Amino acid sequence: MELVVRQLDYWVTTYRRTWKGSVVSSFVMPLLFLSAMGIGLGGYVDDSSGPRVLAGVSYLAFIAPGLLATTAMQTAVLESSFAVFGKFKWNKVYSSMTATPLRVVDVLNGNLLYVGFRLATTCAVFLLVLAAFGVAGSVVGALGALLSAVLVGLACTTPVFGYSAWIKTDSSFAVLFRLGLIPMFLFSGAFFPVEQMPDTVEWLAYLTPVWHGVELCRDFTLGTASWWPGVGHVAYLLVWVVVGWLWARKTFERRLVGASS
Amino acid sequence: MHATTVGEPLVRARGLTKTYGDFTAVRGIDVEVRPGEAFGFLGPNGAGKSSAMRMIGAVSPVSAGELRILGLDPASDGPAIRARLGVCPQEDSLDMEITVRENLTVYGRYFGLSRVECRERADELLDFVQLTDKAGDSVEDLSGGMKRRLTIARSLINRPELLLLDEPTTGLDPQARHLVWERLFRLKQQGVTLVLTTHYMDEAEQLCDRLVVMDNGVIVAEGSPLELIAAHSTREVTELRFGVGEHEAVASKVSDLAQRVEILPDRLLLYTDEGEAAAIAVHDRGLRPVAVLVRRSTLEDVFLRLTGRTLVD
Ligand SMILES: Nc1ncnc2c1ncn2[C@@H]1O[C@H](COP(=O)(O)OP(=O)(O)OP(=O)(O)O)[C@@H](O)[C@H]1O
Ligand SMILES: [Mg+2]
């Protein structure tokens, strides 16, 4: 743990360069989405068949937690794709770190903690905006939604860390974004209930971490959280975090010290 | 600095081997680096220098053989060893997103130094490598030579007992190289043990007390630069340049004038202890080379002798 803490100054130094921009965009993005989709599109949905499909909830209240969870996913992917790949390939920051007492696993965990921090701050700001729109739920609900959003973010982070350490060229990110990120953004129940889709798509959605994150966040902000399926969602997301971490540790080792023997 | 028993080698390798898949990059080398000396690995591209250095840096696992660094086993004591090493890798690994000075202060923290200590060391080292006025600049704006000096400064942040330098001056212009050499020379005088790799024989001659010549993963010779020259070459060399394609034919006419004759594509090398005399004898035989140069033997000649190839191609 002490070896992880030694990286604090590095991450603080890096964050100081970018925090203003990232705070501004964490405010602006939810504002844009909530106005356009929640109020603009929502007004239309609520007037038609929306309330029946959405179990009597306004469209704004329906997509707010969905946007929170997908924002966590986007933040996670942003911080674990090019940002990680570049530290192997472009400026070799990781290999400079492993030439010190830090071990590969310390470097990995230090970076993951930073992403955790980015997720927590981005999602907290997002929830503040939701509260201003009156769709963050109760205080407890909002805190539950925050933790859920960070969890789904981490469930996307560790596998993408693994991927970024595994690929050889950055063009491989196109595959990840087109086959992973964008479909998950669109089809994980953030904007409409997945039951609306054909069975195959519905079942694929259940496999993604993001659907579980959306459900968790929504149950918290709407105040409909219950032990079951809540615990199931958390457990499933934790599996993603842990399996992703094990894979990332393996690909990081291979990249930084060569084939592990 | 930590106390190390006098004379006990800082690096001790026996049959050290590195394989990548089914390719063997380092084929069982024996190396000993003693405290206070500057030790070199001289060899051409692909000789296995970096592979050896990364094992000594306790980063890359040993494939076979035995390796002790500062008396410790890198397989089990990696972090403890790396805490006492300074590493300047072949490719600069500076962080482009933070400033020159931050590259040092942040790095010192990885070794567990306090913030105050990191700041003091950073300023001292920036002064040492003459980058004080660049302290607040972005690393991207530095020239190649400045980046190299910053990397060297960074490798010194923890006051290492052993400094590993992988090709410290490759790619630098002559002036930048001399500046780096001069700084390394000072470190050596301060008692820092240096291990460096190079494919420049002049660098090896300037900096190394002792070196090994590596080729294809094996050590082909070992000794001080002077010892190596004495053992594997003659005192002087007479270089003769004729027209393209004539060297083969001329070689047979002068082979008795030297202990050994090497034919290169662009010149003929006569290895002899009396270079001037050989040049005169060539002239007496009616041969008229385009250019004649008499010089002392260098490590380049040693390498040519041992491997049949030139160092830098
Ligand atoms: N990670 C690796 N995986 C596979 N092969 C490697 C790896 N690293 C080095 N090699 C191969 O091992 C051989 C020795 O490489 P190494 O980098 O140790 O040589 P070097 O003496 O440092 O050369 P240079 O002067 O080019 O730096 C080369 O043929 C290289 O292609
Ligand atoms: Mg090398």
Image (cartoon, helix red, strand yellow):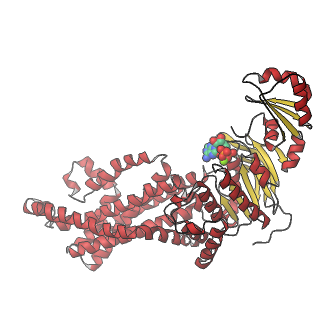
Asked whether residue B14 appears in the rendered view, the answer is no
Q: Quick one: which residue is furthest to the top in this view?
A: B249
Q: In the rendered view, tell whether residue B251 sits above or below residue B173.
A: above
Which residue occupies the foreground of this view, A150 or A141?
A: A150
Q: Quadrant of the N terminus of chain B?
A: bottom right
Residue at left 69%, top 58%?
B180
Where does the image place residue B151, in percent across and percent down from the top left? Answer: 62, 60
Q: Quadrant of ligand 1?
A: top right
Instruction: Indicate left or right for A71 with A85 as reference.
Output: left
Instruction: Indicate left or right for B164 with B105 as reference.
Output: right
Which residue occupies the foreground of this view, B139 or A129?
A: B139
Where does the image place residue B142, in percent across and percent down from the top left? Answer: 55, 59
Q: Quadrant of the C terminus of chain B?
A: top right
Among the 4 quarters of the image, the one containing residue A132: bottom left
Where does the image place residue B53, in percent across and percent down from the top left? Answer: 70, 53
Instruction: Indicate left or right for B218 with B99 as reference.
Output: right
Which residue occupies the foreground of this view, B277 or A145?
A: B277
Q: In the rendered view, tell whether residue B212 sits above or below residue A22.
A: above
Instruction: Indicate left or right for B151 with B299 as reference.
Output: left
Residue at left 39%, top 58%?
A77
Asked whether residue B188 appears in the rendered view, the answer is yes
Which residue occupies the foreground of this view, B190 or B220?
A: B190
Where does the image place residue A7, in percent across and percent down from the top left? Answer: 54, 69
Q: Quick one: which residue is furthest to the left in this view?
A: A47
Report the number of numbered marks.
0
Among the 4 quarters of the image, the one containing residue A218: bottom left
Residue at left 34%, top 47%?
A179
